[in-house]
């Protein structure tokens, strides 16, 4: 891997990441991908986030959905774990709580495929300093 | 994709809103939508708490994201006609408010947790995509170490590990210590029971800590960093290691960072999970391979720390704020929070609260907002009694403190402390004497034993509290308890002993009546202390079937067949078995 030796190099890496993202969209018939984040901090894992993530990774391609499934750290909703955040192309992210395999299946079928919201949604309740 | 529904009504299904609503709002909305023939266009969805529980019942209409509060059955027609059919806002149900401590309409504001839950902590590119390492690049190439330190001082950031010491000032002091070698230490010991803020940051955003430590190294003139982390955090350790490897691979750690002459590298050292090892001098000794015992300050670590070299110790959450301050500016950071406590604080909400979890709020947020709006209120509709902040070193805050804006100084003035951010909520069923005893038990376990007041004094304090809980206390014990608490506080060597009696002193201050009841009325008002329970057999109902006597595990019950049975209170261990077994409801509990 090329070392970062200057501010320019860091910018280049950022550009490379953006190009890779772009490429992924091109490869997907110029369609943006569905982005799925699974909260996998200690408490998420303890309440069963891993099987949910495995399920998504296994099922989405079978159901012809091109998605990027990503593990993340804590989203803060310990009481509603496991939690997922899903961003449909050009939409705002939606967070779901209490996601077991059955809920994950429902989310794929109803939310991802048909755009319906399903029970267990968590409204974004914070502002982010970015 | 064309969504089947044009709009969605998100109805809060959190406990607090459910309790506030007299009717099943979801069903009411569904029924009304049918009446208006809208059931195929508009969908009703159950949602998790919105963090504005005190205004509940709450709903949100999407996609436009309009929030309505205090919604009753009678409002449904208006919402449908005015909003859903005519696209106008039902003004009287809108309670959006801009909070002055953050300028945001949301109660939570995430700075330290800005990336937690958003990036893959095991992929450095994810961090870089979110402007990761840009702050380090900026510091190294655009500013002198003094300029960066001044920024941190100007931001008003204070240490999040408990003490609240101004971070920039500490960096400045360490930078002025002259030595051939200096160290940056990240304190990830997190021993406070119930706290997991630092763990979450390391599990969710480890690169922000690496970046911040490097910035600190640049400011103080250190080329070595050490993360001291408890071995019980395997996932945090794993992710930190991955992050360190990736940063090294990219040359973001190592030599000549960003083409400058600045070198920086980070190692990990593991703690065995002793609470006292979170104290910075003990932590340093533990890193040196010595016993994790504190030593008297001064000398402060900034002057003589790890291997007797100047060492800057900061907490994980403190570091997590640094890149954001550099990227967004000291003025931005200083605009959030209260006069003397800037920025936000992460809290781990635990105990008898509906929404257990990790939250980040601007300094100056009130306890009421934290407990009732973000925390969703007390579990099972019980009454709030107290909240312990600052863990075993802190104190309790009560009903009368609910509207206190939380910051370092207000909590100290109220007899508690900010601590690292654990918040344990207690309800009417919790006994404050037992609570104090729980914390003292912890301290007795965790005292390193180096100094007598803490080693022996805390043990005596714990014994006295046990005596009270066992219904063996006297009024004199209460005086003794208070006096000894003050002695331990005043004469202990380190922060552990200097603060360990706080849970006693603050519960005595706020709940003296409860202590009084334990020794004078021989009652535990909340009914938690078992020793005060008495099982009695009633003369009227007992038919002398002997079942209870046969089942009592300690043979506390005596009586002849067909005669009244009696419980010997001295022997009874209050297991409750007899009460379950008696078919004649003859056994009662008072
Ligand atoms: C008994 C005791 C335990 C402590 N535990 C921790 C801890 O777990 N994490 C922490 O960051 N600071 C802890 N501290 C505070 C540290 O001594 C030190 O003040 C802190 O790490 C400095 O960092 P800050 O200025 O960023 O808060 C503890 C202090 C005492 C007295
Ligand atoms: S106060 Fe307690 S923990 Fe601190 S040095 Fe003394 S014995 Fe050890
Ligand atoms: S079980 Fe009930 S009725 Fe029978 S002896 Fe005991 S108290 Fe009396
Ligand atoms: S409560 Fe338990 S120990 Fe006490 S009398 Fe009943 S069975 Fe025996
Ligand atoms: S650790 Fe529970 S949500 Fe983060
Ligand atoms: S807003 Fe409804 S329960 Fe919190």
Image (cartoon, coloured by chain):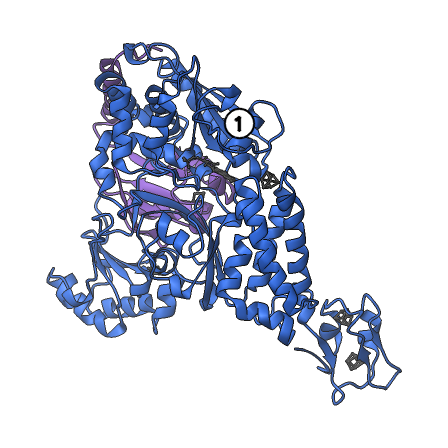
Residue under the point 71% across and 82% down: B585
Does the beta carbon of the residue at mark 1 sit less than 8 Å from ligand 1? no
Chain hosting mark 1: B
If the picture is divided into quarters, which one holds ligand 4?
Answer: bottom right
Residue under the point 39% across and 28% down: B209
Residue tagged by mark 1?
Answer: B284
Q: How many marks?
A: 1
Asked whether, in this view, residue B69 is left or right of residue B359, the answer is: left
- Residue B462 in the image, given as x and y percentages of width and height: 65, 54
- Residue A90 in the image, given as x and y percentages of width and height: 21, 38
Residue in the foreground of this view, choosing between B350 and B76: B350
According to the colouring, which chain is blue? B
Asked whether, in this view, residue B576 is left or right of residue B415, the answer is: right
Which colour denotes chain A?
A: purple
Residue projecting furthest to the right: B560
Would you place residue A107 above or below residue B548 in this image?
above
- Residue B98 in the image, given as x and y percentages of width and height: 20, 54
Would you place residue A11 above or below residue B565 in this image?
above
Residue under the point 22% across and 14% down: A8
Asked whether, in this view, residue A87 is left or right of residue B395, the answer is: left
Residue in the foreground of this view, choosing between B316 and B498: B498
Q: Is residue A67 visible?
A: no
Which structural element holds mark 1? helix
Residue projecting furthest to the bottom: B540
Residue in the foreground of this view, choosing between B18 and B271: B271
Residue in the foreground of this view, choosing between B160 and B179: B179
Q: Is residue B313 visible?
A: yes
Would you call the spot at circle 1 few (<14 residues within 10 Å), some (14-19), or many (20 or more)?
many
Q: Quadrant of the C terminus of chain A?
A: top left
- Residue B138 in the image, given as x and y percentages of width and height: 24, 21
Residue under the point 55% across and 64% down: B430
Q: Quadrant of the N terminus of chain A?
A: top left
């Amino acid at each position: 891997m090329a070392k970062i030796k200057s501010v320019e190099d860091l910018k280049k890496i950022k550009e490379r990441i953006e190009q890779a993202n772009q490429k992924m969209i091109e490869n997907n018939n110029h369609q943006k991908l569905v982005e799925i984040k699974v909260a996998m901090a200690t408490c998420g894992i303890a309440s069963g986030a891993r099987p949910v993530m495995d399920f998504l990774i296994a099922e989405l391609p079978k159901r012809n959905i091109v998605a990027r499934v990503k593990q993340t750290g804590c989203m803060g909703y310990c009481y509603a774990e496991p939690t997922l955040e899903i961003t449909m192309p050009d939409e705002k992210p939606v967070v779901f709580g209490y996601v077991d395999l059955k809920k994950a299946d429902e989310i794929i079928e109803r939310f991802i495929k048909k755009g319906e919201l399903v029970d267990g949604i968590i409204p974004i309740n914070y502002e982010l300093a970015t | 994709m064309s969504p089947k529904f044009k709009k969605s009504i998100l109805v809060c299904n959190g406990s607090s809103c459910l309790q506030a609503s007299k009717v099943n709002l979801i069903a009411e909305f569904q029924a009304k939508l049918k009446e208006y023939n809208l059931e195929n266009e508009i969908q009703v969805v159950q949602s998790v708490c919105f963090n504005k529980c005190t205004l509940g019942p709450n709903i949100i209409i999407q996609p436009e994201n309009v929030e309505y509060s205090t919604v009753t059955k009678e409002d449904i027609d208006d919402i449908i006609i005015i909003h859903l059919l005519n696209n106008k806002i039902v003004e009287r149900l809108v309670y959006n408010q801009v909070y002055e401590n953050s300028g945001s309409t949301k109660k939570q504001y995430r700075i330290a947790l800005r990336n937690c839950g958003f990036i893959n902590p095991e992929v450095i590119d994810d961090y870089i995509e979110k402007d990761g390492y840009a702050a380090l690049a900026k510091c190294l190439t655009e500013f002198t170490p003094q300029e960066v330190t001044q920024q941190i001082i100007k931001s008003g950031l204070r240490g999040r590990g408990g003490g609240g010491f101004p971070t920039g000032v500490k960096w400045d002091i360490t930078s002025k210590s002259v030595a051939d070698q200096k160290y940056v230490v990240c304190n990830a010991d997190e021993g406070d029971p119930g706290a997991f803020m630092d763990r979450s940051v390391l599990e969710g955003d480890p690169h922000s800590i690496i970046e911040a430590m490097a910035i600190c190294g640049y400011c103080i003139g250190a080329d070595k960093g050490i993360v001291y982390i408890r071995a019980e955090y395997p996932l945090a350790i794993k992710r930190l290691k991955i992050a360190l490897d990736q940063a090294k691979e990219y040359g973001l750690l190592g030599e000549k960072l960003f083409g400058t002459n600045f070198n920086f590298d980070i190692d990990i050292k593991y703690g065995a999970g002793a609470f006292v090892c979170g104290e910075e001098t003990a932590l340093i000794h533990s890193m040196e391979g010595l016993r994790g015992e504190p030593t008297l300050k001064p000398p402060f670590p900034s002057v003589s720390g790890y291997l007797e070299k100047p060492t800057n110790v900061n907490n994980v959450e403190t570091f997590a704020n640094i890149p954001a301050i550099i990227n967004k500016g000291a003025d931005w950071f200083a605009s959030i929070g209260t006069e003397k406590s800037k920025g936000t604080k992460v809290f781990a909400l635990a105990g008898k609260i509906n929404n257990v979890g990790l939250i980040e709020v601007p300094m100056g947020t009130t306890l009421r907002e934290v407990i009732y709006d973000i925390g969703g209120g007390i579990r099972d509709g019980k009454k709030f009694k107290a909240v312990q902040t600052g863990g075993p070193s802190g104190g309790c805050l009560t009903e009368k403190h609910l509207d206190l804006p939380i910051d370092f100084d207000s909590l100290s003035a109220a007899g508690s402390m900010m601590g690292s951010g654990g918040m344990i909520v207690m309800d009417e069923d919790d006994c404050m004497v037992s609570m104090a005893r729980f914390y003292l038990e912890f301290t007795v376990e965790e005292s390193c034993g180096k100094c007598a007041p803490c080693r022996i004094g805390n043990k005596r304090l714990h014994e006295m509290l046990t005596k009270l809980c066992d219904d063996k206390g006297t009024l004199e014990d209460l005086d003794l308890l208070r006096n000894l608490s003050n002695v331990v506080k005043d004469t202990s060597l380190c922060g552990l002993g200097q603060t360990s009696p706080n849970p006693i002193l603050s519960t005595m201050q706020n709940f003296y009546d409860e202590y009084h009841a334990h020794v004078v009325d021989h009652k535990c008002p909340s009914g938690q202390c078992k020793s005060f329970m008495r099982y009695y057999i009633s003369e009227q109902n007992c038919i002398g079937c002997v079942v209870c006597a046969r089942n009592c595990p300690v043979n506390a019950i005596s009586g002849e067949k067909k005669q009244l049975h009696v419980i010997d209170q001295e022997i009874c261990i209050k297991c409750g078995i007899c009460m379950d077994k008696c078919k004649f409801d003859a056994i009662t509990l008072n």
